[in-house]
Image: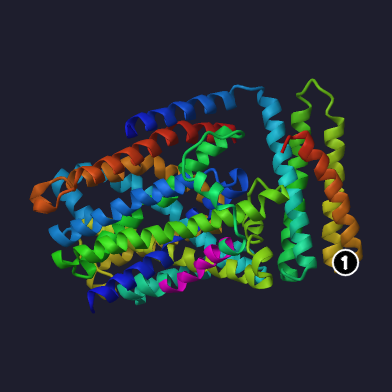
Amino acid sequence: MKAGLTSKILLLAFASTISACSGNTTDRKLLDEVKFFTSTALSVKMTATQWQADTLPDQFARRAITAANIELAGSAGRAASRVMELEVDPRDLLSDMTAAMTGAAAISQAVEKKNRAELKSAIDALDRATAKLRAAGDL
Amino acid sequence: MSKILQIALGIVTSVGGFLEAGSLATAVQAGAGFRYQLIWAIVLGTICLIFLVEMAGRFAAISKHTIIDGVRERFGFSFFVVPLVAISMLNLLVLAAELGGVCIALQLLTGWPIQLWALPVTLLAWLMLWKGTFKIVENGVAILGLVTLCFVVAAIILSPPWGEVLKGTVPTLPDHDALKYWYLAVAILGASISPYLFFFYSSGAIEDKWNESYLAVNRFVAVFGMSFGGGIAVGALIVAAIVFLPRGITEIQTYDQIALMLTPVFGKAGFYLFAASLGIACFGAALELGLSQAYMIAQGFGWQWGEDLPPRADPGFSLSYSLFIVAAGLLILLGLDPLALTIFAMALTALILPVAVVPFMLLMNDRSYLGDHINGWAGNIAVALIIGLSFLLAVVSVPLQIMGQ
């Protein structure tokens, strides 16, 4: 019975893996990139809100948000290069990514300046952009 | 020391020493990406580890051999070279990941870059092995490692839907990201069943001069220590599922993200608890890995070995862990990403497991070593099935994941 279960799991694993890899590679890679981008942007938001609630040290919040902004820029660049290979119009996607990057950069500046009022509007901007990205990537 | 005290100490050190970079990182990625759906992989890995650790202790107590001694003696040196090379390469990656974990913890606390910490951390780990005794390595750091219980406490405070958690113990198919799901399952299995753990355990049993009277202690420690330890990994997965997933953070790519997981529960103390847990757990694992590698080389080549001996009495053994730790420290100094390295090393572990486990299983069924204490059918079947499953999943998912990158 155990052997039967094992072979069933293996067969299903093979099948789902092959099916996962058989789709349009560019589409899939773009969606993966959007997912990574959105996740990173939302990590910036979480770091900022936790810092705002005084549950994170300043040095960590500053460094983590700066590092995440660099990741976001890299990810947006990779997404743009994938978009070039697509036949569909991805302008909305790129514009949402740009809006999220602007929001994340504004968060970074607000944390640097310890300006909590500015931080709130930056978080709201990031929220709006990531909500659209999450919907686009079906996240 | 009374047997009850030994059992208690053994369980405490097993629990404290269970979590390390691999089990933490894989559990957090699994929770953030797939909620409770991958708990089964932790459960399966822990069951396999319970069997293997019990076997390693039984083999040492009855045969008075470590696993490596036995493999070399039974199969010859030329056969032994294969697991030696494969496991050494793997241990190097895992050790680098653990030292990297300590550096990350220090970076979290100070803000100074990881590379800046690589050298002091490497030096401290080496110094602990050079000057320390087996008891310090085995008990000292592991008892400090009890701080990792904070993940269990956090999980309980967050009060997850226990019915769903229970459902996660049964393997199911993913409804998204199939490749990532299976790759993570393999990495979790690799993190739970790291060969260094049971090699270290069998050498430790010889260092502690175990005999047949220790079989009950061994069984209790293996079952309860590893089960509670697995519970910590499940705790980390649950916290990640509750903290990250609802916030849309499904892709965990850095320790900066993971460092946020306890703050919603414990506030600022959660940040420091996380850093302490990561640092202590990884440092303990790094010491065990350094020793485990030195045991493997010294026992394989028939050199004098023992952590309690002064370095001049076992120069080959001491040189082995010294060079090994320096090499792993260099990998971090060169700027390898500790989290990516951790996940990759764990998945690779699953691929290499049969090389380590199959000869050991043959030994465990050899009456010339174990007399009447050879394996029963349950242990043989459970280990064979889990190792076989891990290997086959790794064969499929590791190359696909690498190609996907």
Q: Seen in the image, is A10 located left or right of residue B219?
A: right
Q: How many marks?
A: 1
Q: Quadrant of the N terminus of chain B?
A: bottom left
Q: Residues within 10 Å of mark 1 (few under 14, many from 20)?
A: some
Q: Position of residue A25 (x, y in %)?
A: 65, 25
> Of the residues shown, which amino acid type is indicated by label 1?
Arg
Residue drawn at point x = 78 percent, y = 68 percent: A53
Residue B136 location, quadrant: bottom left
Q: Nearer the viewer, residue B216 or B294?
A: B216
Q: Give the residue number, with chain letter if any, for mark 1.
A: A116
Q: Is residue B211 magenta?
A: no
Magenta region, residue range: B143-155
Work out whether residue A43 can be spotted: yes
Residue B359 visible (yes or no): no
Residue at the (85%, 55%) spot, across then down:
A123
The quadrant of the rendering that contains the C terminus of chain B is top right
